[in-house]
Amino acid sequence: MKIAIIGSSTGGPHILEEVFSQFPVVQAAIIIIQHLPAAFTETFRCHVADLTPMTVEIAKAGEKIAEGRIYIAPAGRHLILEQNRTIHLEDSEKLHGVKPSIDRTMLSLQQIEGDRILGVILTGMGQDGAAGIALIKSLGGYTIVQDPVTAPIRSMPQAALDTGMVSEILTPKDITKALVKFGSGHLI
Amino acid sequence: MGDDNPKIKVMIVDDDTHVRIAVRTVLDDAGYDVVGAENGEKCLELLHSGFCGVILLDIMMPGMDGWDTISKILEEDLFHHIIILMLTAKNVPDTKMIGLQEWVQDYVTKPFDSDDLVERVRYYAGFLPEQGDKGQVA
């Protein structure tokens, strides 16, 4: 299975609109961890769903992820993937001051034969996602950060870059292309 | 916009009068109903009076800064039907932002590009319940 985890914080909803504008159906399970107040989760899901024919849903506990779908992590819970397949929502302490934490999701990934994993870090404050990006790379996955020059807040992409475990630095439009290539099996 | 389609409200919170005037001019022209607040205390007062809409919030202000203002908004349970974008001269936010990330939807640096500001306000206003069918904001 192809699994893409996109981590995003302040400035992210507007950047994600650019990334998913006219986005085709791709054969990958795409999980978006966007730091947002709970009241905005459904509105954010609608905004993304308006951009693409892919099914966009709020991740539900116990659900098995599938390619061709986009999952939005609900606010106030960490999203953990059990065996890279089953969504578990955890109401534990905040990590890096946030819940859901990008790292909490990325660090739950495992090396499973046949799985291909892509990690993407977009704009935001702090270092959430940096440890997760390093893990994904160490598992043989592909890692992308938004070019900090294009990010309203550079520190999250910069923290990921500082790990030395980033495959590519891309603009939002080029992240779109990379996601499409990943879905078609041409990225890794 | 007519009475059936009331203007979306925007609050600019900045101690610099020139910034408040510049933002008001740009967003007035774009069809928004703009109100100014010269500090965090005035912002809270307007929220207590029922303000709903987009808040453009400066960080560096005398007294309560932007982060203190957000903390107070949360403490006083005033985060209802609002969306907060920072509008600041600080290229890099300070660490006081950690823990408040989820409450700040975007970060615009001054001097701002007028078209970019209007576009971001338009986009994030879509998260407000006044936008009709885009979902409910508690």
Image (cartoon, coloured by chain):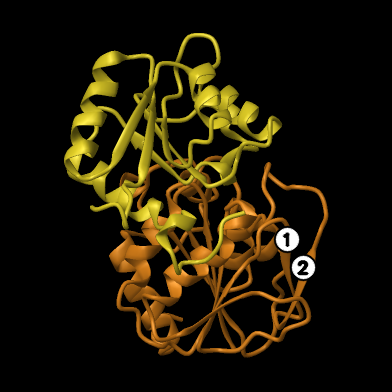
Chain colours: A orange, B yellow
Q: CA distance from mark 1 to mark 2?
A: 6 Å
Horizontally, is A109 left or right of A12 in the view?
A: right
Q: Quarter of the image holding residue B67?
A: top right
Q: Position of residue B32 (x, y in %)?
A: 28, 42
Query: In the depicted view, which residue is nearer to us: A72 or B11?
Result: B11
Residues marked 1 and 2, same chain: yes
Mark 2: few/some/many CA within 10 Å (<14, 14-19, 20+): many
Which residue is disc 2 drawn over?
A89
At x 44%, y 54%, the residue is: A12
Chain of residue at mark 1? A
- Residue A122 appears in view: no
Q: Quadrant of the N terminus of chain A?
A: bottom right
* Residue at the extreme top of the image, as rendered: B62
Query: In the depicted view, which residue is nearer to us: A177 or B23?
Result: B23
Q: Position of residue A71 (x, y in %)?
A: 58, 75
Q: Secondary structure at mark 2?
A: strand
At x 35%, y 29%, the residue is: B35
- Where is A74 relative to A177, above or below? above
Which residue is disc 1 drawn over?
A78
Horizontally, is B111 left or right of A128 in the view?
A: left
Name the kind of residue labelled 2 in the image: Leu
At x 52%, y 44%, the residue is: A159
Q: Secondary structure at mark 1?
A: strand
Horizontally, is A166 left or right of A1 in the view?
A: left
- Where is B135 relative to A130, above or below? below
Mark 1: few/some/many CA within 10 Å (<14, 14-19, 20+): many
Q: Quarter of the image holding residue A133?
A: bottom right
Chain of residue at mark 2? A
At x 46%, y 49%, the residue is: A157
- Where is A180 relative to B8, above or below? below
Say whether marks 1 and 2 touch (CB < 8 Å). Answer: yes
